[in-house]
Amino acid sequence: MIKAKLATLLNNRQNANLIIYGLGQAFNLITPLLVVPHIVGICGIANYGKISIGMAISFFIMVFIDYGSDIIGVKDVAVNRENVHELEKTFLTTFASKFVLLVGVLFVFSMLIWIVPFFNTEKELFFLGLPILIGQCINPTWFLQGVENFKWITILTIVSKLIYLFGIFFFINAVRDYVFVNLWWGIGTVAANGFALVYVYRKYRFSFRRTQKQAVVKLLRENFPMFFSQIFVSLQMYAPIMLIGVFGNNLMAGQYKIVEQIIVIFKTYIYLFFNFVYPRVCFLWQQSIKEALKFWKTFNGLNFIFIAFSMAVIYLFSEWCVSYFTKTNIVEISDLLQIAVLIPLLLAISIPLKQLLLGDNQQKLYVRITMVMVIVNLLTMVLLLPKYQIKGVLLTLIVTEVVTIAVYFCNLKSKINA
């Protein structure tokens, strides 16, 4: 009977996709648990803070390269998955645009590293992090999400993290080696994403010779509002560690990052869950809003229960969680972690509401909400950080998320209750 039920479960394409995707993302989430204690133990909390600031800056710059493809590109591919001509046009135009943007980003950021003292003092760390941006340029995950090819997303996730793990454990052996940590992340993403890009290119028999310059210009123009909004989303995610580095010190940045490293496992999971559910929501929304809502409520409802249970466990065992990453300042960091557990809980509500807002083609409203909330968030954070330090940053993030949920819900209330 068990074997029959398992076969039935796997025969359901959506369930099979979820299992395959889940395996890859579980590996993705476990990786930090393996490497962070090693990095902190060898390089120290302060240097881990430097690494985290460098990684956060790279992840923020990724937004300029993606240029909204992680949302608009996914939706275009999902809606036109049966139209090979449209798939090729979307694929070629998006990658041509990302390449142009990569060249510009590498030039500007390289100049900043030489000119700006904040970057120049750790120029080796920042320069060695540039492969992360190259890996993001050739990343075909957005296309694979649109066609719901979660098998290959899992493959590239596991391959990139295995390379990263290999680099960390075999080459990070002294304090000064902290400058190479982000380089190994970049090497992993370039290798895995390059391999997956070739797979997609050959499977669908695309040809870059058919890339149209006019289409690239049109994409850059039309995607600008979404790209602009994603700048604010990225700022909300990565600005805290950067602000702590600027207005605080590397030790504070390292302590915050240890808290975030525990929480980010679930934040990342929530965003990855969004990537899994979002294409199907967009596809079903075009067919039947009722069916789309049914799918949305089922998956996101179960996901919220899982997040709530996980946050309760982390709250109760916060000191044990912190002690896994570091043996110093355990009580202080544990107190911060008990505040931070509210963030994933709130994200498990706001991110599903974001799915509906975008699935309903309310991109302009989403852009306005995002811009306003992030500006308020950053200004409040800058005001509170000097006096309340890390606690001020965490409380600002929590309040901002609560207000965002309220605004989303007010604009979607009629559809959710339909």
Image (cartoon, helix red, strand yellow):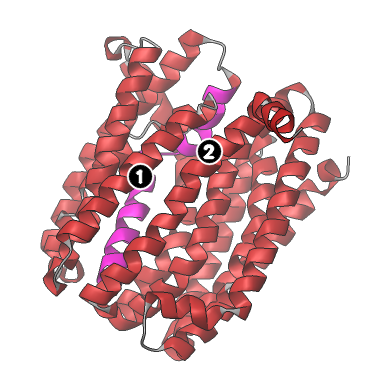
Name the residue that disc number 2 marks. 21
Residue in the picture at 63% in, 51% down = 351
**Magenta: main secondary structure:** helix
What amino acid is found at the position of numbered circle 2 in the picture? Tyr
Name the residue that disc number 1 marks. 64
- On the rendered image, what quadrant is the N terminus found in? top right
The answer to whether residue 249 is visible is no
Separation of residues labelled 2 and 1 (CA atoms): 26 Å
Residue in the picture at 53% in, 38% down = 21
Q: Position of residue 402 (x, y in %)?
A: 68, 66
Against 101, is 86 above or below? above
The answer to whether residue 114 is visible is yes
Q: Characterize the local packing of mark 2: few (<14), some (14-19) or many (20 or more) Cα atoms within 10 angstroms.
A: many
Front residue of 277/225: it is 277
**Upstream in sequence: badge 2 or badge 1:** 2
Q: Secondary structure at mark 2?
A: helix
Q: Position of residue 348 (x, y in %)?
A: 65, 56
Q: Quadrant of residue 253?
A: bottom left
Q: Position of residue 280 (x, y in %)?
A: 65, 31
Tell me, yes or no, whether the highlighted magenta stretch contains residue 53: yes
Q: Quadrant of residue 341?
A: bottom right
Q: Characterize the local packing of mark 1: few (<14), some (14-19) or many (20 or more) Cα atoms within 10 angstroms.
A: many
Residue in the picture at 83% in, 32% down = 290
What amino acid is found at the position of numbered circle 1 in the picture? Phe
Front residue of 259/318: it is 318
Which stretch did the figure color magenta?
49-78
